[in-house]
Image: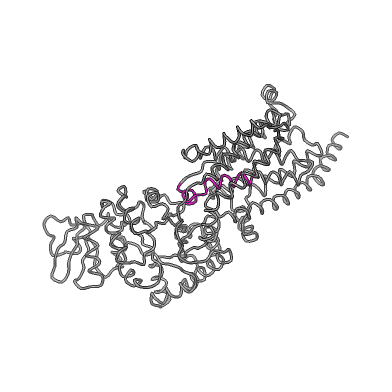
């Protein structure tokens, strides 16, 4: 039995689509059940808003809960906050608290807390200090007790010392989810940190998650005891986006899959970047929609005048309403149930990898229109099975196979589209189909909680941007799609126009690599265009698709059919790879819902084609006639 290679490749793509769909079932189910996000704010911010509005803390909190707030965070107070009087006690140095005389063996600058017997939260503080600070010294006075910590007062100013017990007690028993934020305290053994956190979790059952505060996780590097405490109580830890906190990676891996992604905007960032209310709302909505963030840590802004409580409540309400229109309801989210890559997903990625590799080799060997026999089909299936098993057993091999698949998919999708310049509609649809099915195969294999929670990194995104143009250029030089071969280009003297073009392409490649996943390299005007497209289309198309990839494809169709610029139209073929690389890469963002990815790919397709048609019209009806008239004037 023999079958045409193109037909065999199409049959393989159909099989890959079916296998990938089966492999994606757990992810699709999880995405359907997990459209929940929580709006969380710090309880001390609520206290500040209540004070400004002349309300009690419960009244201010109830108003915010009615406007969409879901939960509140309660943290450990630092030494600086304790000195400011946030707890009903005295905090300072031993020298300040005992002016009459310092006991022997006590350093005058040691941090200490003085608690009056029978005062509010005195029992909670006494118990917590004995657990977390076993080396603390207790000095009994007439009406109070003095606890001397084994640190200087200066060392405790930024360290987490005592939980905010008044706020925890106020919230205890209320049907409000709580987030506990233990602070980092240098010099405390991990076992004592774990016991202290466990005492708080046991005393306040309303705590649903833990978000470590400070520059490092409390107890670092001895985080095993803390992870055991949280794991035993099924308390998830929140993974803060873009956080460089020391030790958080170990804690996340130890608690997997009990992880809730969290997005926050620091007050300093709001002030430094002068973020408006609309900017803040857009950022939180985008985090929940595009990156499946489950906890949105909102803060009242100090940038605008007027009632902060009213303004903050309106922000919570608008975020909640916009999420609801996107099918995301506000409430307390669930963590993902664990599942592993299925054999169907592994076969899908392996099969498409082998098919894409064979397809590219046949193109280089000028045999893509040939036939494939039974032995070739069996060899393809056998090799795919071997690669599938290897991908499941060896994670590093799986990441390598995924990166190669993404690159080859972008190349084949580009070549299919470019080859059909006489039937451009069919070419575009074929190219998008190859990219989407290949992307689904990758998403099926890596679409597990480990990668969805971004604990594992996929290295194929940047490779899929840089490798396809290079592969396509080699293909075109080998097949003489470009007028010259590779040997001719390398042996003749360079042309200044080519050198300028090479420099431009190198600079563009560098910009793409820097911009990929890095918003700081995106100019302000482009950010404004992105925001406009998000509001208009919900799923914003990628810039590479709208303004580069698809327009380059449309212009290629025009210049190829008119046989223009034979020596320079290769630039449009190389630019086309950006569109299909972007499509494949969209499926490599495993934390994004598949429905959103499909909408983004569709929006990128039709908007990019429209922009390309406009550019082509300007080229055909304005630039080319003008160029020809100018040449005629010069010649005359």
Left or right: residue 108 compared with residue 199: left
Magenta-span inclusion, residue 103: no
Instruction: Report the residue that reaches farthest toward the left.
Output: 104
**Image position, residue 27 (x, y; %):** 53, 53
Residue located at (59% from left, 36% from top)? 381
Q: Which of the pair 237/298 is nearer the observer? A: 237
Task: Name the residue at the right extreme.
Answer: 636
Q: Main secondary structure of the magenta part?
A: helix
Identify the residue at horizontal 49%, vertical 48% (top origin). Answer: 451
- Looking at the image, residue 275 sits to the left or right of residue 471; the answer is left
| Picture coordinates of residue 459, whole percent (x, y) | 52, 41
Lateral position of residue 66 relative to residue 182, left or right: right
Magenta-drawn segment: 435-455
In percent of width and height, residue 85 lies at 29, 68
Q: Is residue 627 left or right of residue 527?
A: right
> Residue 438: within the magenta?
yes
- Evaluate whether residue 106 shows in this view: yes
| Between 357 and 403, the one nearer to me in the picture | 357
Classify the position of the N terminus by image quarter: top right
**Residue 497 visible (yes or no):** no
């Amino acid at each position: 039995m023999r079958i045409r290679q193109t037909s065999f490749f199409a049959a393989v793509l159909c099989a890959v689509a079916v296998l990938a769909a089966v492999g994606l079932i757990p992810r699709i189910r999880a995405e359907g059940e997990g459209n929940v996000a929580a709006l969380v704010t710090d309880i001390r911010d609520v206290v500040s808003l209540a004070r400004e509005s002349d309300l009690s803390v419960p009244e201010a909190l109830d108003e915010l809960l009615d406007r969409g707030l879901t939960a509140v965070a309660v943290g450990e107070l630092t030494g600086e906050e304790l000195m400011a009087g946030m707890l009903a006690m005295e905090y300072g140095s031993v020298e300040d608290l005992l002016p009459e005389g310092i006991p022997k063996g006590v350093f005058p600058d040691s941090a200490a807390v003085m608690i009056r017997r029978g005062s509010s939260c005195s029992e909670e503080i006494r118990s917590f200090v004995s657990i977390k600070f076993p080396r603390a010294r207790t000095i009994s006075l007439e009406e109070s007790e003095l606890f001397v910590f084994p640190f200087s007062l200066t060392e405790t100013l930024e360290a987490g010392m005592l939980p905010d017990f008044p706020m925890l007690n106020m919230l205890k028993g209320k049907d409000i989810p709580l987030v506990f934020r233990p602070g980092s305290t240098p010099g405390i053994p991990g076992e004592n940190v774990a016991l202290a956190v466990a005492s708080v979790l046991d005393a306040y059952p309303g705590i649903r998650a833990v978000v470590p505060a400070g520059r490092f996780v409390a107890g670092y590097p001895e985080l095993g005891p803390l992870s055991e405490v949280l794991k035993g109580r099924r308390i998830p830890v929140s993974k803060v986006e873009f956080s460089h906190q020391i030790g958080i990676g170990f804690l996340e891996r130890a608690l997997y899959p009990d992880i809730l992604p969290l997005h926050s905007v620091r007050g300093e960032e709001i002030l430094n970047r002068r973020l408006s209310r609309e900017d803040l709302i857009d950022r939180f909505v985008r985090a929940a929609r595009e990156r499946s963030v489950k906890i949105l840590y909102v803060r009242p802004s100090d940038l605008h005048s007027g009632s902060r409580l009213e303004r903050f409540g309106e922000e919570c309400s608008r975020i909640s309403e916009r999420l609801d229109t996107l099918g995301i309801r506000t409430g307390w989210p669930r963590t993902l149930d664990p599942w592993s890559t299925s054999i169907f997903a592994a076969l899908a990625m392996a099969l498409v990898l082998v098919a894409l590799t064979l397809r590219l080799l046949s193109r280089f060997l000028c045999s893509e229109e040939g036939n494939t026999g039974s032995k070739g089909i069996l060899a393809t299936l056998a090799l795919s099975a071997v690669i599938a098993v290897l991908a499941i057993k060896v994670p590093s091999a799986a990441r390598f196979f995924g990166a190669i698949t993404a690159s080859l998919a972008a190349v084949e999708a580009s070549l299919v589209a470019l080859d059909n310049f006489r039937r451009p509609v069919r070419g575009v649809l074929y190219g998008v189909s190859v990219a989407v099915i290949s992307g689904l195969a990758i998403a099926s294999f890596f679409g597990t909680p480990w990668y969805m929670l971004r604990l594992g990194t996929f290295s194929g995104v940047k490779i899929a941007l840089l490798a396809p143009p290079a592969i396509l250029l080699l293909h075109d030089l080998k097949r003489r799609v470009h007028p010259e071969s590779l040997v001719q280009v390398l042996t003749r003297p360079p042309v200044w126009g080519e050198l300028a073009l090479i420099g431009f392409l190198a600079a563009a490649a560098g910009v793409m690599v820097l911009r990929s996943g890095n918003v700081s390299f995106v100019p302000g005007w482009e950010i404004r265009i992105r925001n406009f497209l998000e509001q208009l289309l919900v799923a914003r198309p990628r810039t590479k698709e709208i303004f580069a990839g698809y327009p380059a494809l449309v212009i290629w169709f025009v210049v190829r059919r008119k046989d223009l610029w034979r020596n320079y139209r290769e630039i449009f073929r190389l630019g086309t790879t950006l569109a299909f690389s972007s499509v494949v890469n969209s499926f490599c963002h495993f934390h994004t819902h598949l429905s959103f990815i499909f909408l983004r790919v569709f929006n990128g397709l039709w908007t990019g084609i429209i922009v390309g048609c406009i550019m082509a019209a300007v080229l055909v009806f304005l630039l080319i006639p003008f160029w020809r008239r100018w040449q005629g004037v010069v010649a005359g």
